[in-house]
Image (cartoon, helix red, strand yellow):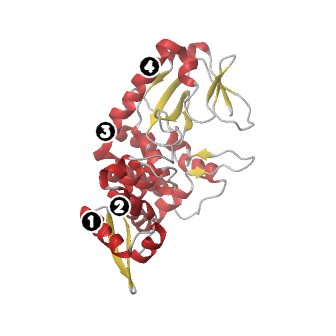
Amino acid sequence: MGVWVVPADLLARARFAVSPLAEVAASLGALTSPGDPVERAFASAHGEAFTAMLDDHPVRRTVLACTVRRARPGRPGWLADFLALPPVGPSETFEHQLARIAALPPGALRADLERTALARLPSGPDDAALTAAATGLLRWVWDRTIASDWPRRERILRADIVARTARLATAGWAGVLRDLGRDREWLPDGRLRINRYDLPDRVLPASADLVLVPVLGSASWVGWEDERYAVHYPVTGRLAAVQEERDTGLDRLIGATRATLLRLLDDPAGTSALAARSGLPLGSVGDHLRVLLESGAVIRRRSGREVLYWRTPLGEALVAAGGRR
């Protein structure tokens, strides 16, 4: 479905909406395959607890493995339908969205996962167990990584909607729709490009609903249920290219030397390795690491005869927000 044909009556009713479920889906993507510094910081903060949860709930791990079909040459990527449900109303709660998933007809979730994974699921978990695992997985991500941050996230999402609504007044729907993620653009004759795969056009019914959903993530996807269709897109600025060769606020905040050492700690390293890579004296490296350690930006653990340092979630967030040289 590379192109959606959007009737004029449907476009006239198109609207924006915030979706907590979309934030959960984007967070799952960040936890399993982080794509930019912000997502890497998020994965660093929550990845260890996420892995432990999956170890304790193997059926959840099975469900997770079948939620995304990676794109390959000649084969489009795919997100499981239950993660891409269009929101009902402008402010549907996560609880309501989770209840909709729990109420899917028997066998629907299994069919969805098998269609996404292009493989049969193990016969062990029955339909009830799969539904419980799916809702439990989503509930964990919401409770542990999003709920406390939801007010901030919602303000950003609604600010994006306000900005795009203002653009609607000056550029019309064509101006609004042309940058809803990579490969999205408005084409002549009422056609909205969804991706660049060679797939048949999908004609949306004139009686359908079309919802545009901003997401605090780097990915974009579409979803539908009955006659409700949704386009999930990254908030304004997420797809902008990052300028790598530049001075950053991180250098001014903590000093250029400490910023350099913090950036070098993508993987655990000892003082000797950091001195060799940075060109700094060994004693100077130790002094700066001590400051980073006391500030909570790094932690250290002994490995044999060597003491290794690596970034904490705070350190990851500083590097992600400050950019990289």
| Residue 19, position as x, y percentages in the image | 41, 35
| For marks 4 and 1 on the same chain, the one whose residue lies earlier in the sequence | 4
For label 1, the SS is helix
Question: Dot 2 corresponds to which residue?
Answer: 258
| Residue 173, position as x, y percentages in the image | 55, 17
Q: Circles 3 and 4: CB distance less than 8 Å?
A: no
Name which residue type carries label 3.
Arg
Name which residue type carries label 1.
Val
Question: Dot 3 corresponds to which residue?
Answer: 152
For label 4, the SS is helix
In the picture, which quadrant includes the N terminus?
top right
The span from disc 3 to disc 2 (Cα, nearest Å) is: 29 Å
Q: Is residue 56 above or below residue 201?
A: below
Question: Dot 4 corresponds to which residue?
Answer: 165
Between 37 and 8, the residue placed more toward the observer is 37
Q: Count residues near mark 2 (Cα–Cα under 10 Å), then give few for <14, some for 14-19, many for 20+.
A: some
| For marks 1 and 2 on the same chain, the one whose residue lies earlier in the sequence | 2
Q: Circles 3 and 1: CB distance less than 8 Å?
A: no
Q: Circles 4 and 1: CB distance less than 8 Å?
A: no
Q: Is residue 2 left or right of residue 20?
A: right
Q: Residue at x 38, y 57 (%)?
A: 316
Question: Dot 1 corresponds to which residue?
Answer: 291
| For marks 3 and 4 on the same chain, the one whose residue lies earlier in the sequence | 3
Q: Is residue 238 above or below residue 53?
A: above
- Residue 152 appears anywhere in the view: yes
For label 2, the SS is helix
Q: Residue at x 33, y 33 (%)?
A: 155
